[in-house]
Image (cartoon, helix red, strand yellow):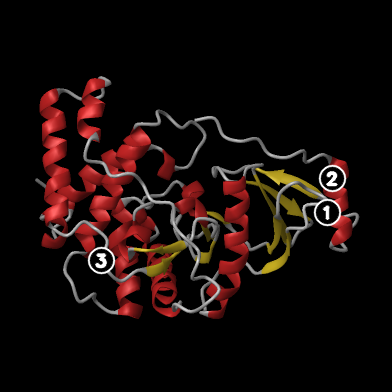
Amino acid sequence: MKLPAFPDLSPERLDAVLARHNMTGSSVVRLPSGGIFNAIFAVGDHVILRVPREHPDFAEATRKEALAVPTARSLGLRTPALLAFDDALDLLPVPYGLYERVPGEPLELLSRPPIETPDAYREVGRDLARLHDGVRRGSALDALALEDLPPPDSWPDELAEQGYLGALDARWLASWLAHLRDLGGSAPNTAVFRHGDMQATNVMVLPTGAFVALLDWGACGWGDAAHDFAGMPLAAVPFMLEGYRDVRGTPSDDTFEARIVARQLHLALFLLRRGPQPDKSWAERPLGMLLDLVRTLVGLPDPRWRTTLV
């Protein structure tokens, strides 16, 4: 899939943006990003400019983010403040946002296994619990929808036809998907407001691994709470659940772990059908996701995880 291009972000256009927001003369440095949606610029030392690709879907994600961030902050979530949002489309052909710049770096860039940074994942879980519990229907966020994945039922056979799997492998994979459905691997009737893109590139930490903030709300919307755990390595999820359950308590059903595994497998198989994703984040690399999923499940002693295997 070829991604839409970014708009013209020439120095002259960026200078016009800075002038509108009383930042004329500030330095502007484009930052590297493992994400897909936005071009990211550091403006001076304290501001981040986020500009989406030139396509209606990416522009809509920018508008969603501008709605979600103030609500998340009002609930006590640690996420950078929205300083300005501009969708006049007279300076750039897409809306853009200016955000507070927080210290640190993305958790993924530490290149440390979750066992070495468990407190960061626990804090992520606590903030997810505040989000899932705190947003109620009847707000400006009601209309924000998640983009869901197509069902995976036919994918084992398709992967076999394309040469990724043999017939026996495809049969086993289909049986695993069916097993997860039987364990409750589908969304419950009650949806919560989700971050929608929870991955380690969207978690800011200090070099020590101390949690700072959650980033990137452009994929937010209503859905299954368990799916907000699916973009992280499964090895990190037990730590996230510790923090989550500190705040929200243990869910009344016992299918939460199965729904997480089902979603991780669903996401990995979806990405596998797109082919390799060089220079993207871990959560865009299906082989790494599959390896982590199987390796971690085999080693977890908790029966809530072990029963998800076939």
Q: Can you identify the residue that label 1 sits on?
A: 17
Real-space Cα separation, disc 2 to disc 3, in angstroms: 46 Å
Q: Viewer-proximal residue, 71 or 140?
A: 140
Q: Viewer-proximal residue, 6 or 140?
A: 140
Q: Can you identify the residue that label 3 sits on?
A: 188
x and y, in percent, of residue 40 in the image: 67, 48
Q: In this rendering, which labeled residue sits more in front, label 2 or label 3?
A: 3
- Asked if residue 114 is positioned above or below residue 153 in the image, the reply reads below
- Is 167 situated left or right of 102 in this image? left
Quadrant (top left/top right/bottom left/bottom right) for the C terminus: top left
Residue 288 visible in the current orientation:
no
Q: In this rendering, which labeled residue sits more in front, label 1 or label 3?
A: 3
**Answer yes or no: do the residues labelled 2 and 1 have beta carbons within 8 Å?**
yes
- Numbered badge on residue 25: none
Real-space Cα separation, disc 2 to disc 1, in angstroms: 6 Å
Real-space Cα separation, disc 1 to disc 3, in angstroms: 44 Å
- Is 43 situated left or right of 62 in this image? right
User: Which residue: 35% across, 69% down?
Assistant: 191
What element does badge 1 sit on? Answer: helix
Q: Earlier in the sequence, mark 1 or mark 3?
A: 1
Q: Earlier in the sequence, mark 2 or mark 3?
A: 2
**Answer yes or no: do the residues labelled 2 and 3 have beta carbons within 8 Å?**
no
Q: Quadrant of residue 258?
A: bottom left
| Amino acid type indicated by mark 2 | Arg
Q: Can you identify the residue that label 2 sits on?
A: 13
